[in-house]
Amino acid sequence: ESNQVQPDVFTFNTALSAYSVLCRLGNLSFQSSMDFVKRMKAIEIQPDVVSFNTLMKISFDSADLKSTIRNKKNLMPATRALREMDEILEVMKEFGVKRDVVSFNILFHSAALACKNGIEYNASQPLLWLEEMRCSDVKP
């Protein structure tokens, strides 16, 4: 009998929260966080919506979207973060994880910041998300 604690999705989500802090400080890249989530699957731990919401928050925070846009600095990090969001959504779909109200709120917030500040973004995407929310019975 082994006394070792086996990691589960909660263990990984806690570690992913630490990645969030490290990414914000510039000590880790967004890609390392994405790789971490993909590794979960490799050891047969299914990432959940919290895992992916945390990834979206990491992308948003690591690009420091609010500050970048507010100060009209180099908008490349913001543009990169929007591409990362698309990647997260694709991986989420591959893993069969459905978005919740938190997921949609992060997406709407990032899209609104982008559009408000002239960052090229598919302006019809939020309408598609609204339709997805309605079809998935996700209440705002």
Image (cartoon, helix red, strand yellow):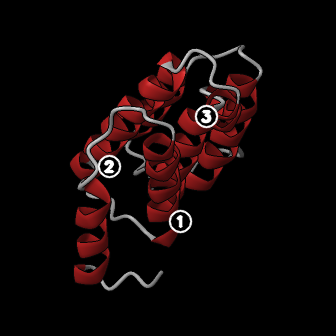
Looking at the picture, tell me which residue is in the foreground, 11 or 69.
69
Q: Which residue is mark 2?
A: 92
Q: Which label belongs to residue 33?
A: none
Mark 2 vs mark 3: which is more N-terminal?
3
Report helix, strand or loop for mark 2. Answer: helix
Residue plotted at (26% across, 65% down):
127
Task: Compare marks 3 and 1 and give the one earlier in the sequence.
Answer: 3
Q: Which residue is mark 3?
A: 65
Residue 123 spot, x, y in % from top left: 28, 50
Instruction: Judge depth for marks 3 and 1 and give the one in front.
Output: 3
Counting residues from the N terminus, which is met first, the one under dot 2 or under dot 1?
2
Q: Is residue 85 above or below residue 136?
A: above
**Would you identify the image quadrant in which residue 73 lies?**
top right
- Residue 61 lies left or right of residue 49; in this view the side is right
Q: Quadrant of residue 23?
A: top right
Q: Is residue 9 left or right of residue 1?
A: left
Q: Position of residue 120 (x, y in %)?
A: 34, 32
- Mark 3 and mark 1: span between their CA atoms? 18 Å
Residue that appears at 71% across and 32% down: 67
> Is residue 6 something that shows in the picture?
no
Residue 20: quadrant of the picture:
top right
Badge 3 density bin: few <14, some 14–19, many ≥20, Cα 10 Å: many
Q: Which mark is residue 102?
A: 1
* Mark 1 surroundings within 10 Å by alpha-carbon count, few (fewer than 14), some (14 through 19), many (20 or more): some
Three-letter code, disc 2: Met
The residue tagged with tag 1: helix, strand or loop? helix
Amino acid beneath label 3? Leu
Q: Is residue 115 left or right of residue 98?
A: right
